[in-house]
Image (cartoon, grey):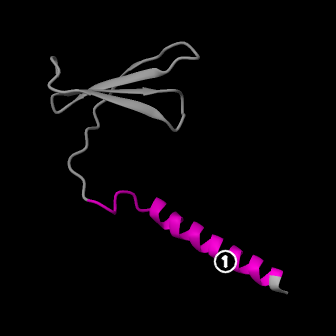
Amino acid sequence: MRRFATLTAALVMGLLFVTGCASKQSEPFKDAERGTSNTDKADTITFPDGFSNVATKCDNGNRVYVAFKGDAAYGSIAVVPNAKGC
């Protein structure tokens, strides 16, 4: 009986956790005010398989580089402040 109660409590807590996270997913950017959004297209450099790809674009006079690999959940960012041509 005690084992059943523990399992039931764990299940209820898990469901509460999942439903709490689900509401955040449906309300993006509700936690902080945002400034302007730069929706201009980026230039992309596609490398052969096995290498990371690069996207670059200008934002407020700065050149932003993002290295990424396919749809992976990681990447890296580099910024060149006051870049020529931006």
Which three-letter amino acid code belongs to the residue tagged 1? Answer: Val
Is residue 4 in the magenta section?
A: yes
Q: Which residues are magenta?
A: 3-32
Q: Measuring from the top left, give residue 19's x and y in whole percent.
A: 56, 70
For label 1, count other residues whose C-alpha is less than 10 Å away and answer few (under 14), some (14-19) or many (20+). few
Farthest-out residue, bottom: 1
Q: Measuring from the top left, give residue 13's x and y in whole percent.
A: 63, 75
Q: Is residue 71 above or below residue 83?
A: below
Q: Secondary structure at mark 1?
A: helix
Is residue 21 in the magenta section?
A: yes
Q: Is residue 57 above or below residue 31?
A: above
Q: Residue at x 28, y 32 (%)?
A: 40
Q: Nearer the viewer, residue 8 or 37?
A: 8
Q: Which residue is mark 1?
A: 12
Q: Residue at x 41, y 31 (%)?
A: 76
Judge from the rendering whether residue 25 lies leftward or rightward of residue 16; answer left or right: left
Q: Quadrant of the N terminus?
A: bottom right
Number of marks: 1
Q: Residue at x 32, y 24 (%)?
A: 56
Q: Main secondary structure of the magenta part?
A: helix
Judge from the rendering whether residue 6 lies leftward or rightward of residue 74; answer left or right: right
Farthest-out residue, right: 1
Q: Quadrant of the C terminus?
A: top left
Q: Is residue 86 above or below residue 27?
A: above
Q: Residue at x 18, y 27 (%)?
A: 81
Farthest-out residue, front: 2
Q: Measuring from the top left, give residue 58's x and y in whole percent.
A: 23, 27
